[in-house]
Amino acid sequence: MTMLLDNIHTPDDVRKLSIGELPQLAQELRRFIIDTVSQTGGHIAASLGAIELTIALHYVFNTPKDKLVWDVGHQSYAHKILTGRKEAFKNLRQHGGISGFPKREESPYDAFNVGHSSTSISAALGMAQARCLKGEQYKVISIIGDGSLMAGMAFEGMNYAGHIKKDLIVILNDNEMSISPNVGALSSSLSRIISGHAYNKFREELKTILQNIPGIGKSAYRVARHSEDFFKGLFVPGLLFDELGFRYIGPVLGHKIELLIQDLKNIKNLNGPILLHVITKKGKGYEPAENDPTYFHGVGPFNKETGKPVSHTSTATYTEVFGNTLTKLAEENPKIVAITAGMTTGTGLERFEQNFSDRFFDVGIAEQHAITFAAGMATEGYHPVAAIYSTFLQRSYDQVLHDVCMQDLPIVFILDRAGIVGEDGPTHHGLFDISYLRPIPNLIFMAPKDENELQHMLYTALQQSHPVAIRYPRGKGFGVPLDQKLNTIATGQAEIIKQGEHIALWAIGSTVYPAIDASERLASEGIHCTVVNSRFIKPLDDETLVHIAKNVKALITVEENVLQAGFGTAVLETLHSHGSVVPVCCLGIPDVFVEHGPQKMLRAKYGIDADGIYSTAKKIAHDSRVGIDPKKNTAFG
Ligand SMILES: Cc1ncc(C[n+]2csc(CCOP(=O)(O)OP(=O)(O)O)c2C)c(N)n1
């Protein structure tokens, strides 16, 4: 059977199809996305839910002149395929392949780079404003999900859009889900709008009826309009968009392409800020994803017949160990409360939620609010644990600094996905938290070498009366046994794992085991290393550091963070302030945004795996400045 998709190279080809052919195109896209993502992994549920909407948008608007600004960008797979990336889509999220998110470097159809949520309205409004300044004519359309719309930034964008009144279309893609079911007052308001759909029909009908009554029609309509707010409030509590200066249209059905096209054509030439409310189903057309959209939000490779993951090992992830440990600790300590910003599953808090629903708070995609909300609870004697991915905590920097650390409040920041996350790429790597948190006074900052140490660190953090951050990587631990009894780790005390007289490997978090591996290979070649698990980024174990530095010929720091203002820099600062002259080499991420690709591969590329540490140590050992005679080819003679 001929596939329509085979002849689609740009959206112009979509526009050549008849409206009657578009449902078939949607089916083909759906199959293609399921086939591919089952092999590559990716954000399938949101993308399946946005297929008809994507086709309709490209059909009605003149892309790329008209600009589509996708929020988060995880729903953009159909957009990628229709905009010349069908072949490239087979390498979705693979190293060297196309990104899982819109990327301007990748295509002129990608108007804005995304990955973090709730930016699309501000970005689109900026484009609309620039268009006016340039005196050009094109449409700008933001496509935002109901979950992403809940964030403060989306409201800041809408508020300003209503103020400057530029032509701007916001498509609200409402599937009543964030990653988990949506939360919050706006969310329930949207649901009531959907159920109040009848109101809109009623209003239109009323208008026609009243205006057609001979003699009194016009004045009756005026009276009715005055009382409209009253009626509207009765039927549709979602006046918010109108109040923000948007013309609200909808709700409309998001999987009926023909109707969607009609709706988009109707709003295309309206002026001012318009919000079109589109109802979609997350995971649409793939039963396993429709049944479990939370699991299929973002998945690894899976069997497309069953929906089951292709690989699974029994080793616990750091996330699971965190969630289980916190739940256990909360049984004994009623002051522990857990907070997440729309990431209950991702941060491992489902069990906590089930066991302590009254002490669990999913605030929606609102990282800034999450932290200050935690601060408020801490002032009232609670011990909040705010679990947020490293990359998303960037959103809350001022709240961490100003609302928590400046008041020295006991809050535990759990930074999951710290380091290289893999296929989600540069928007999601957690490679900056050491640099952005390290300068903040009062904060204690730790990173466990394995999942067992994570338990002890969490226990330790909850003994403190100060803010504490714990960072750990995405994925499985090392499969080490988990101690039943938890201990307090002395603040700022590093763990000396082994001693050797040649080179010190001063490692933190995920780099400790690779440092141990490297030291074993080096030892077999006569290069003897001291290996230290720093455990703390802040405070550093100055005494141990200075002492060790005196007794080796060189020191190497290893971190899974950018080198700028990172962990190695902290070590350098300490050594410098103590007058140490030991040569130091810092291993970590250079001054780049790291691309997407497998964690293992990227760690190797940036030289922070066992091989990388080994090679650097070997090079240093043979460097004449370290006191080796290179001709002898033996380290430190
Ligand atoms: C600042 C930020 N916090 C958290 C996330 C993780 N995240 C990605 S998509 C998503 C849910 C978005 O929900 P919605 O906008 O309704 O889109 P849907 O997935 O339902 O289509 C979340 C929480 C993110 N990308 N950015």
Image (cartoon, grey):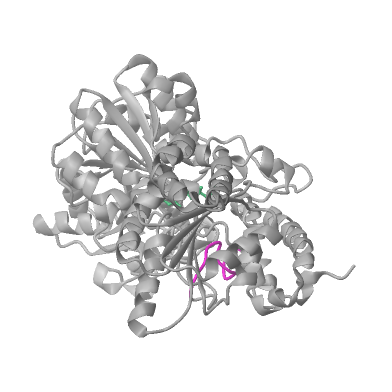
518 to the left or right of 252: left
* Residue 100 lies within the magenta run: yes
**Quadrant of the rendered image containing residue 315:** top right
Of 152 and 279, which appears nearest the observer? Answer: 279
> Among all residues in the image, which is located at the extreme front?
215
Determine if the magenta segment contains residue 98: yes
Determine the residue positioned at 39% across, 51% down: 242
Q: Is residue 443 visible?
A: yes
Judging depth in this view, the residue of 94 and 98 nearest the camera is 98
In front: 259, or 511?
259
Write the residue at 58% across / 65% down. Answer: 266
Residue sitting farthest toward the top: 332
Q: Position of residue 188 (x, y in %)?
A: 47, 36
Overall secondary structure of the magenta section: loop
Name the spot of residue 431 as percent of width and height, x first. 37, 57
Left or right: 343, with 135 as reference point: right
